[in-house]
Amino acid sequence: MTGAELIINGLQKEGVRAVFGYPGGAVLDIFDRLYEARVPFYLTRHEQGAAHAADGYARVSGEVGVCLATSGPGATNLATGLATASMDSIPLVAITGQVATHLIGNDAFQEVDIIGISRSITKHNFLVRDVNELGKVFRSAFYIARSGRPGPVLIDVPKDVQQAKTQLPYPGDVNIPGYKPTIKGHSQQMRKVAGLIAHAQRPVIFAGGGVISSGASDELMQLSEKIQAPVTTSLMGLGAFPEVHPLALKMLGMHGTEYANYAIQEADLLIAIGARFDDRVTGKVDKFAPKAQIIHIDIDPTSIRKNVEVTAPLVGDVRNVLIDLLKEVKPMRHDAWLEQIDDWKSKHPLRYQQNHHISPGQIIEQVANLTKHQAIIATEVGQHQMWTAQLYNFLTPRSFLSSGGLGTMGYGFPAAIGAQVAQPDRTVVLIAGDGSIQMNIQELATVATYQLPLKIIIVNNQSLGMVRQWQAIFYNRRFSNTCLRRRSDCPKECDGDQNGCPKYIPDFCQLAEAYGIPGLRGDKPEQVRPTLEKALTTSGPVLVEFIIDAEENVFPMVPAGAAIDQMIRGMA
Amino acid sequence: MKHIINLEVANTIGVVARVTGMFTARGFNIESISAGRASMEDGSANVTLVVRGDDWVIEQVTKQLNKLIDVIRVSDVTESDFVGRELLLIKINCPPAKRTEVSMITNIFRAKVVDISNRSMTFELTGIDAKITAFIETLRPYGIKEISRSGTIAMVRDSQYKS
Ligand SMILES: Cc1ncc(C[n+]2csc(CCOP(=O)(O)OP(=O)(O)O)c2C)c(N)n1
């Protein structure tokens, strides 16, 4: 068997159902094997698209996403995708071609040290110098990617290794001496945690992406109901707990709900599960949850005490730990506390203003109604992302795809493609900003060629809205380079709303049509519902663009560096 | 406080870069690092790190090192009874007329002469880092031409005695 054949063989043995990638000189041998292999391959139009598509595929399916790129520029184009997956703990295996082993280090054509480049943005990486190592490396890569705290693993395979022959078959189990993730929680710690819960009067559960990756949503629900603790989630945790549940506090943090943030600040016990206390969550960290003892359940020991001091850490797989913990805790009631929370909920609900423009809140609510909160929703990064997170009301895990940790504009569109490949029968909706979508707009071709029935919704505010919002609030409305229609002869003080602006730049509907994808547009509130209905009932891909006012901002908002209960409420 | 951390690592290409890369990526500092191949049969290597930091830093450093796939074992020997040693090679200006005087000093430290020329003398010394530093300072007035210092390596004692 050649190295290339072994790679195809490995993909099959690992149960890979889709590979996303782009060919080139250093991976010709692998592509030659793909010609007749039964592993479905998806040709994106940029390697970054391939990496994000593999990521979207992984988030939705829970399987390892796989992408493949050539050496040099192909490999560097994967970098943003690897970093995105790394920050959000998404299992990926990226395979890159490399120049032949005897050329490594010579600045050969299309050579880059991708091992060096990707070291800090992968969970691990491998350079395979000997075809006899390839099987073991491949097996290890998949194991490392999906186990413990998941993450991306890169395998760099020189061209001569792909061509060399080996007698060794694809291995069964591998032993990696330095890698033994802790799965089961420590029983003594478990009792300490149960004791803290038994004494709590104002408990709050803070669930993160770890609940989703370990498949612990049911256990989370059982715990919450058993001890009557309300649940708030990070952006990464959206869908881990149904947001319409009476105990749901929805998202916390910078653009979270007021009641979630108040609950955190008043809680006497915070149970953090599979979350890492990102600064977008905690705000000013020494003012975060000031009255609470903190329990921190996480599979990654480095997450514990990284950002906040905790009373009781519990390292292990979240689902495993919760199953054990459920046996230790007794049912509890916290009527007064829940009453207080309901009071906050009714006094400070999420709301948005409706005027003669289309409001972004209206778009998200209509998408939610028409899809019955059951669609897979991907977003780009910016205001539209936060509006979606606030208003869609996610009910199930693995249905919200967004670049949480890295905040990668350009992530959402290819991720939605990967999601649709993973779940061909579900409705997949991308909610994008007019800025972000242009970062990987070339993937319209991928949607068109594979006829993926994706619904692309562009919330078009003619600007880089989230940056513009900061300029409006903290930089005295000096809108430096955030207007997407700005030309060289525009007056400096223009706030983005002048006569003579090009109407569309680009005309997204025409652009979609150029790829053979129908494009629909709405700019009046009464057009939102019928346009969405039409898009959602069309069988193939559709692009919808809604024009909104650039002055729309995301509220509530915690200014950077403030405590999370110091929220700006906005105009609404 | 200063900590001495011993690592057992897989002897793979780039393993030292993974270790040092973690320090730069996370904003921690390494005071010294020394690495060598430890075992012939299973291809593991040992790395000794000297790291300065408060409890939080050391806890994070230890955990982050453990998280590296190629790091098999992490042990912070600081709290145990351990032998820590550094190796120094030092070349100083030393015309023949000064040899006796210099030798008197270097004898006190039990340094070994490894090279001698018309203008210079080179010594070898092992010891804990305080001893190495004291030796260097004592020789400084003669004019130091070159220094090569290994960084600490360490091993925990099994016995109860101290030397
Ligand atoms: C690759 C990348 N570059 C820059 C940024 C900084 N950034 C964050 S949000 C944003 C604006 C996004 O604009 P758009 O996609 O139109 O969404 P909106 O905020 O208008 O909804 C920018 C530039 C980023 N997150 N990612």
Image (tube, rainbow, N blue to C red):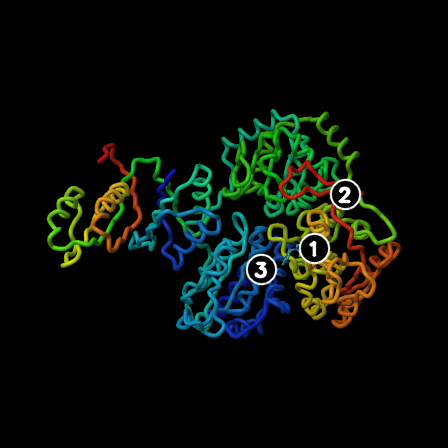
User: In the rendered structure, which amino acid carries the disc numbered 3?
Assistant: Thr
Closest to the camera, between mark 3 and mark 2, is: 2
- Residue in view at x 66 percent, y 26 percent: A332
Q: Whole-Å distance between the Cαs marked 1 and 2?
A: 23 Å
Disc 3 and disc 2 on one polypeptide chain = yes
- Nearest the viewer among A344 and A565 is A565
Q: Which chain contains the residue that carries disc 3?
A: A
- Residue in view at x 79 percent, y 67 percent: A502
Q: Position of residue A135 (x, y in %)?
A: 45, 62
- Nearest the viewer among A515 and A356 is A356
Quadrant assignment, res A545: bottom right
Q: Whole-Å distance between the Cαs marked 1 and 3?
A: 16 Å
User: In the rendered structure, which amino acid carries the disc numbered 2?
Assistant: Gly
Q: Position of residue A78 (x, y in %)?
A: 56, 63
Q: Which residue is mark 2?
A: A570
Tell me whether the residue at label 3 lies in contact with that at label 2, contact meaning CB atoms closer than 8 angstroms: no
Counting the numbered discs, the total is: 3
User: In the rendered structure, which amino acid carries the disc numbered 1?
Assistant: Thr
Label 3 lies in ligand 1 vicinity (Cβ under 8 Å): yes
Which numbered disc, 1 or 3, marks the residue that appears first in the sequence? Answer: 3
Task: Find ligand 1 in the image and state its quadrant.
Answer: bottom right
Q: Which residue is mark 1?
A: A379
SS at badge 2: loop
